[in-house]
Image (cartoon, helix red, strand yellow):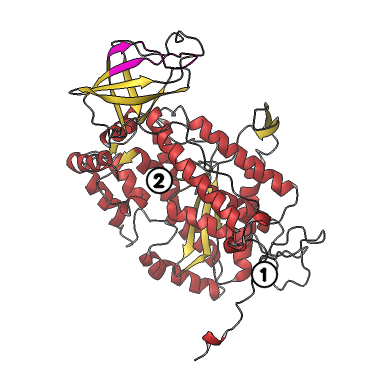
């Protein structure tokens, strides 16, 4: 946790209201998101109990499983969920635009927009990933007529899409699958712990407490206040349920359903809707609050990466490729890890460049400094072709951690990044640096590329557009010590089973004399 986050939390406790951590919105919000509020059975996370899902905040689609232990009812729930989610996901697939060719990429087609799923908290994000993992390998009656428990035809496809969205959510800055609590905690600091922030009702109580109440009082009420019936006024829907609701209300209703009493199924659906509706409304209210913030300048760039991700998965599905493997091979896992590390560094840099309040945190950490230009002295480099290397003195009250010949970076008005080198401390609060690029190709710097006396500037010690590391070998070129040949053997995917999973056959190590006493 950064120093500015600690200070913001302390201020929230002192004022009784959440403290802003950002002046801009750092995630993309779709004009037509799909909100998904699931509930699971107590003690069995993989057993769905119900869900509210849809794009209309006033008319959500209610899905209910009156008896989660019934396999057929659970599959019917997944089939109904697929009927809602898949048309939404596929509605963006055919609206495309052409990206011009670049030095590293040929002219290509990308979807003009992408579908976005919003859930209540990070536990719901994990549940989306779990649903994908548990359904993408399911066999249908068309795939295998002898399958004892076939699933409806569209369920495996739903699993593939949910898996993709769940995996994409692990990429920092991605907005295909968003958590309302993660969005709010990125932009506001409360006076409670990170674990308590996962209760959406308590989190919203800090962001906008009711009249006459402090954040801590409103959060305590949201977490524990019960009505005359003994049930929570704001159920968690986390997607775990309230134990009191399970024991005193849901269990008797399920017993009536098992006994075949007429109307018991409709009663359970009504009870589940009452548990999920407060969370459903809170998710939409969270998005209302976030839409009031202006979108950060780099948000569109990150959303474009999400659009590419959506387009790539669309192409894999249309090409009939098999589902995602249960486990990544060594190269794929390393590529994902490297990509996420690069995305994290890029996200931190972009958020700081988009938001003065975020940049203030980097300045407090000694990773950037801002100040006024006191003096500019033109100088030239040594060599056969001298180039401009002006010396700039910046007066600052910050205390950046500058090493000898440290690299510094500044964002130019045209979006480019200019680099400089630290020369020395030229006095109390005066930093002397040498600008080394971003001034054009001539002997005279282009107008506006060199700071002038009196300008307010901000230099960072971190790169603005970090690049990934060295490339990785292809799977067939990966050494056996890292999971490559000759030990890897993949199952053959035939034309008759185009959706069959790719399974890796692992042989146990041979027994040796050291294995026996």
For label 2, the SS is helix
> What residue is shown at x 54% (from left), y 68% (from top)?
68
Q: Quadrant of residue 327?
A: bottom right
> What residue is shown at x 33% (from left), y 23% (from top)?
458
The numbered mark at residue 505 is 1
Give the answer, above or below, for where 199 lies relative to 511.
Answer: above
> What residue is shown at x 54% (from left), y 47% (from top)?
168
Residue sitting farthest toward the bottom:
517
Tell me if residue 385 is in the magenta stretch: yes
Looking at the image, which is closer to me, 90 or 299?
A: 299
Task: Specify start and end residues of the magenta stretch as a single range.
Answer: 374-393
Label 1 packing within 10 angstroms: few (<14), some (14-19), many (20+): few
Residue 458 seen in this snapshot:
yes
Residue 32 percent location from the top left of the image: 55, 37
Query: Magenta region, mostly helix, strand or loop?
Result: loop
For label 1, the SS is loop
The numbered mark at residue 35 is none
Residue 388 percent location from the top left of the image: 42, 13
Looking at the image, which is closer to me, 371 or 40?
A: 371
Looking at the image, which is closer to me, 317 or 33?
A: 317
Give the answer, above or below, for where 141 lies relative to 514.
Answer: above
Label 2 packing within 10 angstroms: few (<14), some (14-19), many (20+): some
Tell me if residue 80 is in the magenta stretch: no
Residue 4 percent location from the top left of the image: 26, 38
Q: Quadrant of residue 315?
A: top right
- Residue named by callout 2: 182
Residue sitting farthest toward the front:
384
Q: Quadrant of residue 437?
A: top left
> What residue is shown at x 21% (from left), y 25% (from top)?
397
């Amino acid at each position: 946790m950064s120093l500015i986050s600690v200070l913001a939390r302390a201020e929230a406790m002192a004022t009784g209201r959440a403290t802003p951590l950002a002046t801009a919105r750092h995630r993309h919000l779709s004009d037509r998101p799909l909100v998904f509020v699931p509930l699971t059975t107590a003690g069995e996370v993989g057993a769905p109990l119900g869900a509210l899902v849809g794009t209309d905040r006033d008319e959500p689609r209610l899905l209910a499983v009156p008896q989660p232990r019934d396999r057929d009812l659970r599959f019917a729930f997944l089939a109904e969920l697929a009927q809602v989610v898949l048309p939404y996901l596929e509605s963006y697939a055919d609206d495309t635009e052409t990206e011009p060719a670049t030095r590293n990429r040929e002219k290509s087609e990308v979807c003009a927009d992408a579908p976005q799923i919003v859930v209540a908290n990070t536990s719901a994000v994990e549940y989306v990933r779990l649903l994908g993992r548990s359904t993408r390998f399911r066999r249908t009656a068309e795939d295998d007529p002898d399958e004892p428990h076939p699933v409806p035809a569209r369920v495996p496809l739903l699993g593939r899409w949910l898996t993709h969205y769940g995996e994409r959510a692990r990429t920092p800055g991605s907005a295909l699958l968003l958590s309302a609590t993660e969005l709010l905690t990125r932009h506001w600091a409360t006076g409670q712990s990170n674990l308590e922030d996962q209760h959406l009702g308590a989190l919203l109580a800090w962001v906008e407490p009711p009249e006459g109440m402090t954040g801590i009082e409103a959060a305590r009420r949201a977490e524990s206040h019960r009505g005359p019936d003994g049930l929570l006024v704001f159920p968690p829907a986390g997607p775990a349920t309230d134990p009191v609701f399970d024991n005193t209300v849901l269990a008797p209703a399920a017993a009536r359903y098992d006994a075949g009493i007429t109307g018991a199924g409709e009663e359970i659906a009504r009870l589940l809707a009452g548990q999920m509706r407060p969370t459903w409304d809170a998710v939409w209210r969270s998005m209302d609050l976030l839409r009031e913030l202006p979108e950060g300048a780099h948000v569109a760039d990150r959303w474009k990466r999400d659009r590419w991700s959506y387009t790539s998965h669309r192409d894999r599905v249309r090409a009939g490729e098999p589902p995602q493997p249960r486990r990544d091979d060594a190269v794929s896992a390393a590529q994902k890890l490297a990509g996420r590390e690069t995305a994290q560094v890029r996200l931190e840099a972009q958020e700081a460049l988009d938001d003065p309040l975020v940049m203030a945190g980097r300045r407090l950490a000694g990773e950037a400094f801002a100040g006024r230009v006191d003096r500019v002295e033109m100088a030239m480099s040594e060599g056969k072709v001298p180039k401009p290397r002006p010396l700039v003195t910046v007066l600052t009250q910050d205390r950046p951690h500058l090493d000898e010949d440290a690299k510094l970076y500044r964002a130019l008005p045209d979006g480019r990044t200019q680099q400089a080198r630290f020369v020395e401390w030229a006095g109390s609060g005066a930093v002397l640096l040498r600008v080394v690029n971003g001034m054009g190709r001539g002997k005279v710097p282009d107008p506006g590329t060199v700071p002038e006396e009196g300008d307010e500037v901000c230099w960072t010690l971190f790169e603005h557009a970090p690049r990934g590391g060295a490339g990785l070998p292809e799977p067939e070129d990966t050494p056996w010590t890292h999971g490559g040949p000759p030990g890897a053997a993949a199952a053959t995917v035939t034309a008759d089973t185009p959706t069959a999973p790719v399974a890796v056959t692992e042989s146990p190590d041979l027994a040796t004399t050291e294995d026996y006493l």
